[in-house]
């Protein structure tokens, strides 16, 4: 499968403003292709168990072992340095027959229109990206690992998601990251092959994918107490999406700090508008009080629009406070609240052990929801007051020393309940157990 990359006006305007402030003689001091290289292995054992109470699927479970190897070279010396990044992934099924399939950590296929077949015993993929670096600007072309508010590969399953395209980053100013790029294909976390870019809700329909996604953005972390991001993306013939956030930490004393913050997305249809009319403003506000080893967070989230807040399919580009383990609380015209408590058990002498407990509740007036069912088919338009809630509990332990140093064990539990107005936001109990072991070879 091939693709011709077209640099849109958004991408060209961004790259034209990238500063080149470093001196060429500094670039000549590059560590070298071999000397600056690294090889990292990541082993992830993932078990997912879903109990969908509405459908009667009481034992929807899958268990797998993932292996990821990532090689990153250094750069050849000179004003323009050349390098190569490469990766290989393997997923093995440990459990998950046809009657238990569908948790999304393993590939799935349908025996017929209504019945899922068993996942294959293994699936794998490999990819690479060539890279060039001049001064403080880096260009990559090929298979990319991306993480930003408008295009973030899914990282919460057994294997990570990748994208195929080009990316450009610049770090000339301390604390400021400028980036942009364009991708045409994605390798989902539970598949071996690539496919076109689509959205979470648009994936329900045939021929609703896009030729490419272009993005540009800036991320600032140069101040000790302030971080902020500003991004724009064009999903060709579907939407233009804009994002901004601001996060501030006020230190009261050695034990107490206050952390207010805001996230905001605006999404507007563009081009052929393959998913119909979209005019959506979604934001969330949070306020966190940190006191020693304790923290309490209160959050409010609002979707202003007659379509749900949508994002790149299978990805993690939902930088909203109430995006939880099961629900994103992103229905049309939805308001939601969250209260969360976190504790670091280092406070009682157990370094590496932490926990998080939260309760979220949402309500949406769906009488104004767009009835264009070609875009989404997730909500019952007859439901005037759609309500749902979710409880989440995370407990994580990271080994601090010895042969298992850096190995982590994460136990996650979610319980979700909804009234009948939410056609797909089901009554659901879910358990995930994830064991991660990162290993630096060199």
Image (tube, rainbow, N blue to C red):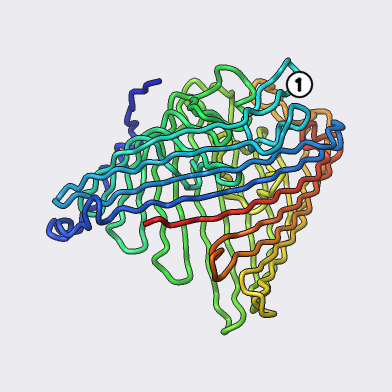
| Secondary element at tag 1 | loop
Measured as percent of width and height from the top left, residue 228 is found at: 47, 58
Residue furthest top as drawn: 112
Could you tell whether 400 is left or right of 142 in the image? Answer: right
Q: Quadrant of residue 332?
A: top right
Give coordinates of residue 342: x percent, y percent: 69, 67
In the figure, is residue 3 to the left or right of 294?
left
Answer whether residue 434 is visible to the viewer in this image: yes
Q: Residue at x 36, y 55 (%)?
A: 177
Q: Residue at x 37, y 21 (%)?
A: 2
- Report which residue position mark 1 lands on: 115
Q: Is residue 349 left or right of residue 11?
A: right
Picture quadrant of residue 233: top left
Residue 28 location, quadrant: bottom left
Q: Of 351 and 263, which appears nearest the observer?
A: 351
Image location of residue 290, percent across then percent down:
64, 73
Return the residue found at the far bottom: 254
Instruction: Give the crowd class for mark 1: few <14, some 14-19, many >=20 residues within 10 Å.
Output: few
**110 or 62, nearer to the observer:** 62
Image coordinates of residue 400 in percent, x first then y, are: 56, 70
Residue situated in front as seen by the camera: 48 or 392: 48
Residue 311 shows in this picture = no
Q: Residue at x 66, y 61 (%)?
A: 396
The quarter of the picture where the N terminus appears is top left
Task: Give the quadrant of the C terminus.
Answer: bottom left
**Of 342 and 96, which appears nearest the observer?**
96
């Amino acid at each position: 499968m091939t693709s011709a990359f077209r640099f849109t006006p958004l991408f060209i305007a961004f790259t034209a403003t990238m500063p080149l402030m470093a001196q060429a003689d500094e670039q000549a001091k590059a560590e070298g292709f071999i000397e600056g290289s690294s090889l990292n292995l990541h082993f992830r054992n993932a078990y997912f168990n879903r109990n969908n109470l509405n459908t009667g699927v009481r034992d929807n479970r899958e268990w797998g072992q993932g292996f990821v190897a990532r090689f990153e070279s250094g750069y050849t010396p000179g004003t323009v340095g050349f390098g190569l990044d490469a990766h290989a992934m393997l997923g093995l099924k440990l459990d998950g027959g046809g009657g238990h399939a569908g948790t999304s950590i393993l590939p799935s296929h349908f025996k017929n229109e209504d019945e899922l077949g068993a996942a294959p015993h293994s699936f794998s993929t490999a990819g690479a990206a060539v890279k060039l670096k001049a001064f403080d600007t880096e260009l990559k072309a090929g298979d990319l690992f991306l993480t930003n508010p408008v295009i973030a590969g899914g990282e919460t399953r057994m294997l990570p998601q990748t994208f195929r395209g080009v990316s450009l980053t610049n770090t000339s100013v301390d604390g400021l990251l400028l980036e942009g790029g364009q991708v045409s294909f994605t390798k989902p976390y539970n598949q071996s092959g690539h496919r076109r870019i689509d959205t979470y809700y648009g994936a329900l329909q045939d021929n609703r994918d896009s030729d490419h996604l272009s993005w540009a953005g800036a991320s600032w972390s140069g101040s000790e107490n302030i971080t902020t991001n500003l991004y724009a993306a064009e999903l060709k013939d579907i939407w233009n999406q804009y994002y901004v956030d601001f996060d501030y930490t006020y230190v009261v004393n050695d034990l107490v700090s206050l952390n207010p913050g805001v996230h905001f997305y605006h999404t507007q249809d563009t081009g052929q508008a393959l998913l119909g009319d979209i005019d959506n403003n979604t934001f969330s506000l949070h306020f966190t009080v940190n006191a020693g080893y304790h923290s309490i967070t209160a959050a409010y989230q609002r979707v202003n629009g007659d379509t749900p807040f949508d994002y790149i399919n299978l990805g993690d580009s939902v930088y909203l406070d109430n995006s939880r383990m099961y629900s994103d609380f992103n229905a049309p015209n939805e308001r939601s609240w969250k209260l969360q408590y976190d504790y670091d058990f280092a406070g009682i002498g157990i370094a590496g052990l932490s926990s998080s407990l939260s309760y979220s509740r949402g309500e949406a007036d769906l009488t104004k929801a767009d009835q264009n069912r070609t875009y989404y088919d997730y909500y019952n338009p007859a439901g005037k007051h759609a309500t749902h809630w979710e409880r989440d509990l995370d407990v994580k332990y990271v080994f601090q020393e010895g042969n298992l140093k850096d190995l982590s064990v994460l136990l996650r539990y979610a319980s979700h309940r909804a009234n009948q107005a939410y056609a797909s936001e089901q009554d659901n109990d879910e358990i995930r157990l994830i064991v991660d072991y990162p290993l630096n070879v060199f």
